[in-house]
Amino acid sequence: MYKCVVIVGLACLMTACSDSDKTQKVEQDHVWKEQTDMINKAKDVEQLLKDSAAIQQQNIEEQVH
């Protein structure tokens, strides 16, 4: 009997919250979009700097040898 009540209660909670979760997710995506875009841009810049440093190191090694 207890298991049945718990299962029904969980099913009600899941169906009741599903629509509001979708609306809330859309709002959160919008709120955090600028921050995630900036993080992605920073990652791109970091990779660009790493590539540039590798090329510079390769040029230095070529000049030394």
Image: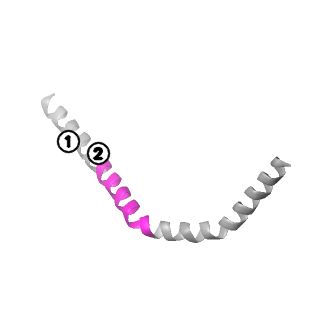
Left or right of 23, for residue 49? left
Helix, strand or loop at disc 1? Answer: helix
What residue is pinned by disc 2?
51
Magenta residues span 31-47
Left or right of 29, for residue 48? left
Q: Amino acid at mark 1?
A: Gln
Where does residue 2 sit, x and y in percent of width and height?
81, 48
**Residue at the location (49% across, 66% down)?**
29
Where is residue 55, by image quadrant?
top left
Where does residue 32 sit, x and y in percent of width and height?
42, 64
**Residue at the location (34% across, 54% down)?**
44
Left or right of 62, for residue 30? right
The local crowd at label 1, few if under 14, some if 14 to 19, many if 20 or more residues have their Cα within 10 Å, is: few
- When the figure is inspected, residue 48 is found, relative to residue 27, above or below; the finding is above
Farthest residue to the front: give it: 2
| Residue 41 covered by magenta stretch | yes
Instruction: Identify the main secondary structure in magenta.
Output: helix
**Residue at the location (72% across, 65% down)?**
15
Instruction: Report the number of discs.
Output: 2
**Residue at the location (67% across, 66% down)?**
18
Q: Amino acid at mark 2?
A: Asp
The disc placed on residue 38 is none
Nearer to the camera, 14 or 56:
14
- When the figure is inspected, residue 28 is found, relative to residue 63, above or below; the finding is below
Helix, strand or loop at disc 2? Answer: helix
Quadrant of image for the C terminus: top left
- When the figure is inspected, residue 19 is found, relative to residue 38, above or below; the finding is below
Nearer to the camera, 18 or 44:
18
The disc placed on residue 56 is 1
The answer to which of marks 2 and 1 sits earlier in the sequence is 2
